[in-house]
């Protein structure tokens, strides 16, 4: 069972993802242009379509406000990082599901041992966005690969969940899960870890979403 | 004079990768060769690409509509390097400024099995 939790698009893209062997996708919309339930014409029993929002925040306070606003409305909350303060605030918030682009406009990966520890504590997944590898060339691609290698090195030490997504805007950005696994193996992940980043870790986010409403604190929830 | 063919034990062992390419413009065999080689040279470099023994064995035009053209084909490569070849094929994204996507369908030991299992040709192509 493979999932892709960061896709921008319509039913055509969902159809293609199903053909390539995915069992579910999350359609992500930007926080400043959010419309609830964008897709209605593609409903299959064995294909999961989740709604998500990508939050662009100016500062940690703004981030908290936006997370509070969207948590009840959507299934997946993605935070677009870049600023070191935003990266840290996102990893310290258990309501956030995925941190994307922590290396945006930076020379390093944007994740250090402090942030990695917090991400592992709060189960915030860090994304490996394949569009950064597929759509770039030569020196830029090499820089992206080195950023991902640094994230993977920290993942081995602190064991925060890693998630691989396509960030696709059209069907030409999608790749089959098996191709992605071989690509991740080039980055130094074992095949089991690569598989988990496409199947088990997204599934955990989905499972957590189901029980999130009843959760009081981490480890305790209301049964009735 | 032509070289005498190597005995089977000394030949390089091969694998056949079945692939499909989706593009907006029709692709010829030469285009596919240049795309695969360029992507492999960019991603792995000259030293590793020399070990791959890349060769486009066969290609078929399978489906064509105005905005989507699908071709399927078989790439021959060295037995030990299938994973690296697969990774470099999946990184192909553009041909003359137009988007292209390459997907691996499967890997097989013979051309016959690759066609039967992964390419699944219709009668008109046989």
Image: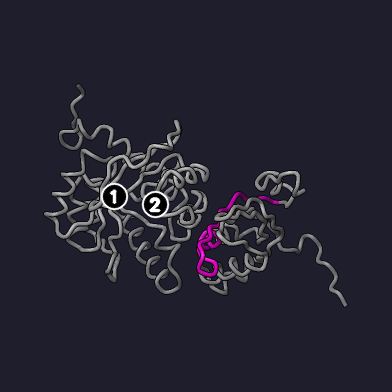
**Considering the image in quadrants, where does the C terminus of chain A appear?**
top left
Q: Nearer the viewer, residue B6 or A195?
A: A195
Residue at far bottom of view: B1
Quarter of the image holding residue A101?
bottom left
The circle on residue A133 is: none
Q: Are marks 2 and 1 in contact (CB under 8 Å)?
A: yes
Q: Position of residue A121 (x, y in %)?
A: 22, 47
The circle on residue A98 is: 1
User: In percent of the image, x 32 and y 35: which residue is there?
Assistant: A207
Q: How many marks?
A: 2
Quarter of the image holding residue A196?
top left
Residue occupied by mark 2: A165
Numbered range of the magenta stretch: B87-109
Q: Which chain letter matches label 2?
A: A
Decide: is B124 above or below B9: above
User: In percent of the image, x 66 and y 64: which residue is there?
Assistant: B28
User: On the picture, is B98 further left or further right than A37?
Assistant: right
| Secondary element at image label 2 | strand
Decide: is A102 above or below A3: below
User: On the picture, is B78 further left or further right than B40?
Assistant: right
2 and 1 marks on the same chain = yes
| Secondary element at image label 1 | strand
- Count residues near mark 1 (Cα–Cα under 10 Å), then give few for <14, some for 14-19, many for 20+: many
Q: Position of residue B105 (x, y in %)?
A: 60, 49
User: In percent of the image, x 57 and y 74: which residue is there?
Assistant: B46
Q: Earlier in the sequence, mark 2 or mark 1?
A: 1
């Amino acid at each position: 069972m493979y999932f892709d939790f960061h896709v921008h698009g319509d039913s055509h893209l969902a159809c293609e993802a199903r053909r390539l062997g995915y069992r579910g996708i999350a359609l992500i919309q930007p926080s400043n242009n959010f419309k609830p339930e964008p897709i209605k014409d593609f409903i299959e029993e064995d294909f999961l379509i989740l709604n998500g929002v990508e939050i662009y925040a100016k500062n940690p306070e703004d981030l908290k406000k936006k997370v509070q606003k969207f948590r009840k409305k959507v299934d997946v909350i993605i935070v677009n990082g870049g600023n070191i303060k935003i990266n840290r605030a996102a990893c310290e918030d258990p309501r956030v599901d995925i941190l994307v682009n922590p290396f945006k406009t930076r020379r390093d990966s944007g994740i250090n041992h402090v942030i990695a520890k917090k991400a592992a504590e709060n189960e915030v997944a860090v994304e490996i966005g394949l569009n950064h590898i597929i759509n770039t060339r030569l020196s830029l691609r090499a820089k992206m690969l080195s950023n991902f290698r640094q994230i993977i090195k920290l993942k081995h030490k602190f064991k925060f969940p890693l998630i691989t997504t396509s960030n696709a805007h059209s069907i030409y950005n999608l790749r089959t899960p098996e191709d992605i696994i071989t690509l991740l193996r080039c980055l130094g992940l074992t095949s089991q870890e690569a598989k988990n980043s496409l199947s088990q870790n997204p599934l955990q986010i989905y499972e957590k979403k189901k029980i999130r409403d009843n959760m009081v604190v981490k480890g305790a929830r209301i049964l009735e | 004079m032509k070289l005498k063919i190597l005995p089977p034990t000394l030949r390089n062992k091969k694998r056949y990768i079945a692939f499909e390419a989706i593009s907006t413009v029709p692709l010829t065999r030469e285009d596919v060769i240049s795309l695969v080689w360029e992507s492999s040279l960019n991603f792995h470099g000259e030293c590793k690409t020399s070990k791959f023994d890349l060769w486009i064995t066969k290609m078929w035009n399978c489906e064509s509509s105005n905005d989507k053209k699908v071709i399927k084909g078989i790439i021959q490569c060295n037995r030990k390097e299938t994973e690296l070849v697969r990774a470099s094929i999946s990184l192909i994204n553009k041909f003359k400024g137009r988007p292209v996507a390459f997907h691996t369908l499967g890997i097989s030991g013979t051309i016959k099995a690759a066609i039967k299992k992964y390419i699944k040709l219709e009668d008109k192509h046989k």
